[in-house]
Image: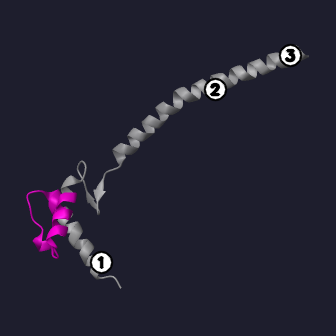
């Protein structure tokens, strides 16, 4: 009877080892696949404006507007749509801040 318990325990440990190896082999691949799909579907935005890349144009426009104390959309200009949208984001933030109760 003791030999049967030892044999059964050995098979159990063997199966646990095989299952563990499968998990360690499959889970990282699954997580990488999930991560890649999630990244492709997520687009960066800057205060609601879609960014292409790292949003640096939007940030530059926002900072410029902040430094110049821009208060109206007509003051936003430039050669880059993302820069102008960053300026718009700043102005909209100022309008929202001023309209708080």
Picture quadrant of residue 6: top right
Residue 91 colored magenta?
Answer: no
Read off the magenta span.
59-85
Dot 2 or dot 3, earlier in sequence? 3
Rounded to the nearest angstrom, the CA distance separating label 2 from label 3 is 22 Å
Mark 1 or mark 3, which is nearer to you? 1
Residue at the outermost bottom position: 101
Left or right: 99, with 12 as reference point: left
* Label 3 element class: helix
Question: Are the residues flagged by discs 2 and 1 in contact, CB closer than 8 Å?
Answer: no
Label drawn at residue 19? 2
Q: Position of residue 73 (x, y in %)?
A: 15, 72
Query: Residue beneath label 1, please?
Result: 97
Q: Residues within 10 Å of mark 2 (few under 14, many from 20)?
A: few
Q: Is 34 placed above or below 84 here?
A: above
Picture quadrant of residue 57: bottom left
Residue closest to the eye, 55 or 22: 55
Dot 1 or dot 3, earlier in sequence? 3
Residue at point 29% right, 63% down?
47
Residue at point 86% right, 16% down?
4
Quadrant of the snapshot with the C terminus: bottom left
Residue at the outermost right position: 1
Residue at point 24% right, 72% down?
92
Label drawn at residue 4? 3
Magenta stretch, overall SS: helix
Question: Are the residues flagged by discs 1 and 3 in contact, CB closer than 8 Å?
Answer: no
Left or right: 23, with 15 as reference point: left
């Amino acid at each position: 009877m003791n030999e049967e318990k030892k044999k059964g325990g050995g098979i159990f440990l063997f199966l646990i080892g095989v299952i563990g190896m499968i998990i360690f082999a499959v889970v990282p691949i699954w997580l990488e696949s999930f991560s890649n799909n999630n990244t492709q579907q997520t687009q960066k935005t800057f205060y609601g404006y879609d960014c292409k890349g790292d949003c640096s144009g939007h940030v530059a426009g926002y900072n410029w507007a902040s430094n110049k104390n821009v208060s109206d959309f007509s003051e936003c200009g430039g050669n880059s749509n993302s820069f102008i949208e960053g300026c718009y984001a700043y102005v909209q933030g100022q309008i929202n801040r001023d309209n708080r109760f």
